[in-house]
C-alpha cells in the first residue's frame, strides 16, 4: 500500500527538486524556449553571479539574504519571548483563561495576506499608528515603518565571510568555554583557546574575502521592524500554545520541591521550568525558522514586491522567474532557499529519528 505513495513522493517532490536543481545550472530562459533552442549547461555560474556578480539582480539577491538573516533572528526572538510571557501568564490559572487563550491564538487562524493588509494600514506613515499621537495633543511621529530607508549595523558585503567566521568562532569559544567550566576538559579548553586566537587574528588583521567590486554596503533595514511586528503578532499565539502545553505538563511537585529548597519563583522558572521547556523551544525555533526563511505573502502584501527594504528571496525568485523569465537564475534562488530550510530542518529530523530509534 505504501508503494503508490512512495512513487508519487519520488516524482512530485524529489523529482521536481532534482529538475529544479538541474535547471539552476543552465541558462534556461523564455527566449530560448520560444525559439525552440535548448538550454546550455553553465554549472554553478548562476550561483556565483548571485553571490559575487555586479548585476542589479545579484545585488538585490544579496540584500534579500541579509534581510532574511535579520528578519529570521528578530522574528524568532519576538515569537519566543511573547509566546513564553503569554504562556506564563495563562499558567497562573487566571480567570477567563479560555477567553484569553482564544484571543491570543486567533491571529494564527488568519492568512498572512489578511495580516499584511491590516498591518500595512496600521503602519501607514500618514495614518494608522502614526495618527494616534496627534489625537492626544502630541507631535506626529516621523517614523516611516515599512517604507523607511534607514539602515543600522552597516557592513561591507565584501567582508561577509570574515564577519561570519568571527561570529562562528565566537559561538565556538562561548560553547567550549562553558563546557570547560562544567567539565574541566582539556579538549574544550584547547578548542576555546584556538577559537579565541583565530577570532583575534581575523579581527586585528582585518582580513577581507573580496566578493564584489566596488564596495557594497549592507545592513539592517529598519523597515523590517514592521514586518517582524506583523509576523510576530500572527505567530506568537502559536508559540504560546506550545509553551502552555509544556508548562501544564510539568508536575507541580517538581516546582514545589524547588521552592522547598529555597528557590524563589523566578528561580523556579529559571532553573526548573525553562530547562524542561528546552525541547519545546527547539521545536518552536525550527518551525518559526522554516516559516521565516520561505516567507512570501506577507512581504508581498506589505511591500508590493518592489520594496527592497523588506524584500526576501522568495519575492526575488518569483519576479526573476515569472516576470524576468530567467528560469535558470530563478531556480538557483529556489535551490538556495531549499538549502537554507534544509540546514534548519534536517539536523532536527535526524536528532528526532535517532532519539526514536534509541528509545
Image (cartoon, grey):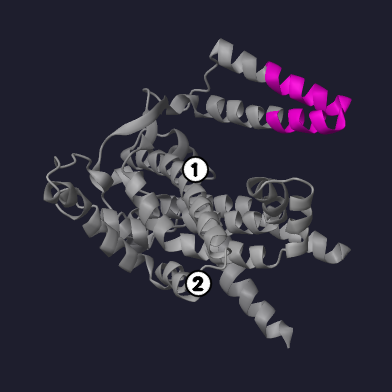
Q: Secondary structure at mark 1?
A: helix
| Residue in the foreground of this view, choosing between 322 and 348 | 348
* Left or right: where 144 falls relative to 90: left
| Residue in the foreground of this view, choosing between 266 and 51 | 266
In which quadrant of the rendered image does the N terminus lie?
bottom right
Q: Quadrant of residue 284?
A: bottom right
What residue is at 72 percent from the left and 63 percent from the top? Answer: 250
Whether residue 25 is visible here, answered yes or no, is: no
Coordinates of residue 222 in the picture (x, y in percent): 33, 39
Q: Quadrant of residue 315?
A: bottom left
- Magenta segment, which residues? 174-197
What residue is at 49 percent from the left and 23 percent from the top? Answer: 210
Q: Residue furthest bottom?
A: 1
Q: Secondary structure at mark 2?
A: helix
In which quadrant of the rendered image does the C terminus lie?
bottom right
Packing grade of label 1 (10 A; few <14, some 14-19, many >=20) is many
Packing grade of label 2 (10 A; few <14, some 14-19, many >=20) is some
Coordinates of residue 183 in the picture (x, y in percent): 86, 32
Q: Are marks 2 and 1 in contact (CB under 8 Å)?
A: no
Coordinates of residue 166 in the picture (x, y in percent): 59, 25
What residue is at 35 percent from the left and 53 percent from the top? Answer: 320
What residue is at 53 percent from the left and 64 percent from the top? Answer: 90
Q: Residue furthest top?
A: 205
Give the labeled residue for mark 2. 97
Label at residue 296: none
Q: Quadrant of residue 338?
A: bottom right
The answer to whether residue 306 is magenta is: no
| Residue in the foreground of this view, choosing between 102 and 179 | 102
* Left or right: where 142 falls relative to 271: left
Coordinates of residue 67 in the picture (x, y in percent): 41, 43
Give the labeled residue for mark 1. 47
Amino acid at each position: 500500500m505504501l508503494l503508490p505513495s512512495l512513487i508519487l513522493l519520488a516524482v512530485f517532490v524529489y523529482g521536481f527538486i532534482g529538475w529544479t536543481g538541474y535547471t539552476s545550472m543552465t541558462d534556461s530562459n523564455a527566449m530560448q524556449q520560444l525559439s525552440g533552442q535548448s538550454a546550455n549547461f553553465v554549472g554553478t555560474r548562476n550561483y556565483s553571479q548571485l553571490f559575487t556578480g555586479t548585476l542589479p539582480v545579484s545585488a538585490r539577491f544579496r540584500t534579500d539574504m541579509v534581510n532574511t538573516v535579520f528578519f529570521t533572528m528578530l522574528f524568532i526572538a519576538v515569537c519566543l519571548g511573547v509566546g513564553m510571557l503569554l504562556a506564563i501568564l495563562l499558567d497562573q490559572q487566571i480567570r477567563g483563561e479560555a477567553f484569553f487563550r482564544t484571543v491570543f491564538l486567533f491571529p494564527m487562524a488568519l492568512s498572512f495576506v489578511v495580516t499584511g493588509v491590516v498591518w500595512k494600514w496600521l503602519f501607514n506613515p500618514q495614518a494608522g499608528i502614526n495618527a494616534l499621537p496627534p489625537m492626544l495633543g502630541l507631535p506626529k511621529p516621523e517614523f516611516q515603518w515599512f517604507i523607511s530607508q534607514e539602515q543600522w549595523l552597516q557592513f561591507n558585503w565584501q567582508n561577509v565571510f570574515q564577519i561570519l567566521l568571527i561570529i562562528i568562532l565566537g559561538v565556538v569559544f562561548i560553547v567550549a568555554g562553558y563546557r570547560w567550566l562544567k567539565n574541566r576538559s582539556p579538549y574544550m579548553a584547547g578548542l576555546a583557546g584556538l577559537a579565541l586566537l583565530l577570532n583575534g587574528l581575523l579581527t586585528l588583521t582585518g582580513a577581507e574575502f573580496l566578493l564584489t567590486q566596488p564596495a557594497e554596503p549592507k545592513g539592517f533595514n529598519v523597515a523590517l521592524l514592521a514586518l517582524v511586528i506583523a509576523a510576530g503578532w500572527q505567530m506568537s499565539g502559536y508559540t504560546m500554545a506550545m509553551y502552555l502545553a509544556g508548562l501544564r505538563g510539568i508536575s507541580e511537585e517538581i516546582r514545589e520541591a524547588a521552592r522547598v529548597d529555597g528557590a524563589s519563583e523566578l528561580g523556579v522558572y529559571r532553573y526548573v521550568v525553562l530547562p524542561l521547556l528546552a525541547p519545546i523551544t527547539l521545536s518552536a525555533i525550527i518551525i518559526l525558522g522554516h516559516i521565516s526563511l520561505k516567507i512570501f505573502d506577507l512581504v508581498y502584501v506589505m511591500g508590493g514586491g518592489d520594496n527592497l527594504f523588506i524584500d526576501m528571496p522568495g519575492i526575488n525568485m518569483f519576479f526573476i522567474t515569472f516576470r524576468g523569465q530567467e528560469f535558470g537564475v530563478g531556480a538557483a534562488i529556489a535551490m538556495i532557499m531549499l538549502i537554507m530550510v534544509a540546514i534548519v530542518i534536517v539536523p532536527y529530523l535526524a536528532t528526532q529519528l535517532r532519539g526514536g530509534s534509541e528509545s
